[in-house]
Each structure stands twice: as C-alpha cells, then as structure tokens.
Image (cartoon, rainbow, N blue to C red):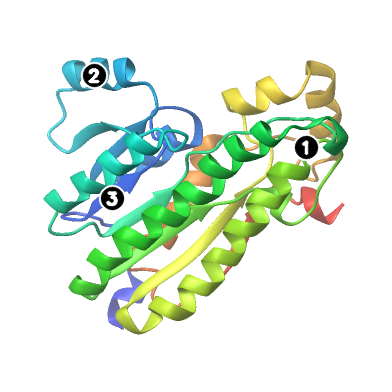
C-alpha cells in the first residue's frame, strides 16, 4: 500500500478502450491517458473518419476502431474484434448522444436511438470486456453519466432515464466484479465546454447556466478527464460503485 503515497499517475503498459474518443471529453480523456503512458483504443461512429484517423495516425500507442451502437452489425463486428485482445485494462464508456424534447413530443425512434447508444452500448461493452478483466484479475471501468443522473430539467426525459440506468448498472457491476479487483465507477460531468453542450443550449442559455454554477464557469474537458484518470489508475484501490458528479457545484444550487 506504499504506492498510495505516490501521487504520480502512471498507466505505462495499460491498455484502455475509450468510446467516443475522437472529440470533446473523450478526446481529453485519451490525451491524459497517453500522457500517463497508456495505449489507447478509440472508437468513432463514422467509418470514413475512423479510416482517415488511422491513416494519419503516427502514434504507436493509439488506434481507432469504428463502432456505431445504433447499428447491430457494427456492434457485433466490434465485439468479435475484442477476441483479438489478451487484455483490456481500462474501459471508459464515454460515447453518448442527447436530444432535447418534451416527453409528449418524443417518439419511439428517439427512445430507441438514445437507449442503444447511451445504455445498451455501455451494457454490452461492460459485459464483454469484464470477461477479459476477470481472466486477468484486474480492471477499471468508468461509465460516463451526467448531472442529469442526479437532477433533471424539462426536455430530458429520455436522457435522464438513460443516465440513471447507467448509474444503476455501475452499482451492480461494482458488487459483481469487486472480488476480481475490477473497480467500476461512473462520472457525471456538469456543463462542459464541448460541441454537445454548444448544440443543446443557446448562447443565452449557456450564459444563464454559467451564472448559476458556483464556480462561475463551465468545466474544461481536461478537468473531467483528470477525475476519470484517477479512477482508472492504481491510485484508486478501493473506490467503487459510485456516481461522482463533477459540476462545479451546480447540482447543489
């Protein structure tokens, strides 16, 4: 336990799978993991973009794979690719989508789309990758939820349902996998300066929100990534089954 006193986060030799790792918070997570020495496998939904990224990539510890959670053939192919890996030490379920609409104005198609990406996708990856982790007697899983797993507002009935489901999944997996030294947590980002935040809120709304955050600013993606990096490292040796809200105090207002 002496290593607990060492605050340096070193993921050298670790292999991390980060979904939705090509932009926003996912990209920041990937950058922090690379800085810590990990090898990262990043997923993107657009096959052409993934092909372009792989062609342009010169980093030895980075690879890109296509994965569209709303396409069963893509999911099946991706799960089959997991058989090529002897181990994956860290899983970050970051990919997610949102649609703002009052409950009475949503459709079954809306529900299925958000459910497939935000809930079923993480569920399937947790199921398959935890099998590898159990064999190796080690793993760290971080599922990305949202402040909307703790509070809600109009227009987020599906998204809030999704993120509460992921928080529940996290708790259950933590008690199922703890004896294998697999720690499972979720992180709920508050308002963060990403493309998703910009597209789901107007400029006026963003200003009003900023004024409501006790820290009087939104998070930078790296600030969310730093929490995830800690949870994914050996510095985290006992924290599991928690949904950690990182929001500058917003949900306490």
User: Residue 236's spot in the image, x, y percent?
Assistant: 41, 70
Circle 1: element type: loop
User: Is residue 31 visible in the rendered structure shown here?
Assistant: no
Circle 2: element type: helix
Mark number displayed over residue 141? none
Front position in the image: 183 or 68: 68
**Marks 1 and 3, how far apart in space?**
33 Å
Front of the two marks 2 and 1: 2
Q: Is residue 57 above or below residue 241?
A: above
Circle 3: element type: strand
On screen, residue 108 versus residue 157, left or right, reads left
- CB within 8 Å, label 1 to label 3: no
Classify 10 Å Cα crowding around label 2: few (below 14), some (14-19), many (20 and above): some
The residue positioned 60% from the left and 61% from the top of the image is 167
The residue positioned 80% from the left and 42% from the top of the image is 213
The residue positioned 23% from the left and 56% from the top of the image is 88
Front position in the image: 16 or 119: 119
Q: Is residue 74 above or below residue 17?
A: above
Classify 10 Å Cα crowding around label 1: few (below 14), some (14-19), many (20 and above): some
Name the residue beneath numbered marker 3: 16
Name the residue beneath numbered marker 1: 216
Q: Earlier in the sequence, mark 2 or mark 1?
A: 2
Name the residue beneath numbered marker 2: 51
Q: Is residue 203 above or below residue 110?
A: above
Q: Quadrant of the N terminus?
A: bottom left
Front position in the image: 10 or 87: 87
User: Residue 154's spot in the image, x, y percent?
Assistant: 87, 38
């Amino acid at each position: 336990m002496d290593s607990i006193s060492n605050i340096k986060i070193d993921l050298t030799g670790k292999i991390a799978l980060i979904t939705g790792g090509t932009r926003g918070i996912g990209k920041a997570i990937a950058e922090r993991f690379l800085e810590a020495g990990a090898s990262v496998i990043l997923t993107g939904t657009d096959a052409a973009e993934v092909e372009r990224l792989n062609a342009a990539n010169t980093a030895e510890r980075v690879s890109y794979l296509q994965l569209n959670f709303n396409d069963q053939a893509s999911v099946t192919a991706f799960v089959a690719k997991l058989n090529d890996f002897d181990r994956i030490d860290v899983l970050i379920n970051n990919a997610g989508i949102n649609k703002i609409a009052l409950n009475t104005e949503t459709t079954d198609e809306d529900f299925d789309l958000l459910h497939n990406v935000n809930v079923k996708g993480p569920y399937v990856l947790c199921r398959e990758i935890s099998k590898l982790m159990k064999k190796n007697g080690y793993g760290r899983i971080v599922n990305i939820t949202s402040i909307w797993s703790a509070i809600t507002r109009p227009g987020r009935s599906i998204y809030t349902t999704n993120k509460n489901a992921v928080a529940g999944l996290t708790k259950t997996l933590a008690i199922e996998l703890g004896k294998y030294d697999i720690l499972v947590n979720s992180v709920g980002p508050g308002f963060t300066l990403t493309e998703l935040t910009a597209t789901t809120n107007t400029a006026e709304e963003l200003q009003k929100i900023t004024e409501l955050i006790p820290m009087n600013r939104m998070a930078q993606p790296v600030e969310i990534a730093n929490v995830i990096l800690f949870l994914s490292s050996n510095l985290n040796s006992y924290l599991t089954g928690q949904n950690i809200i990182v929001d500058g105090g917003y949900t306490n207002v």
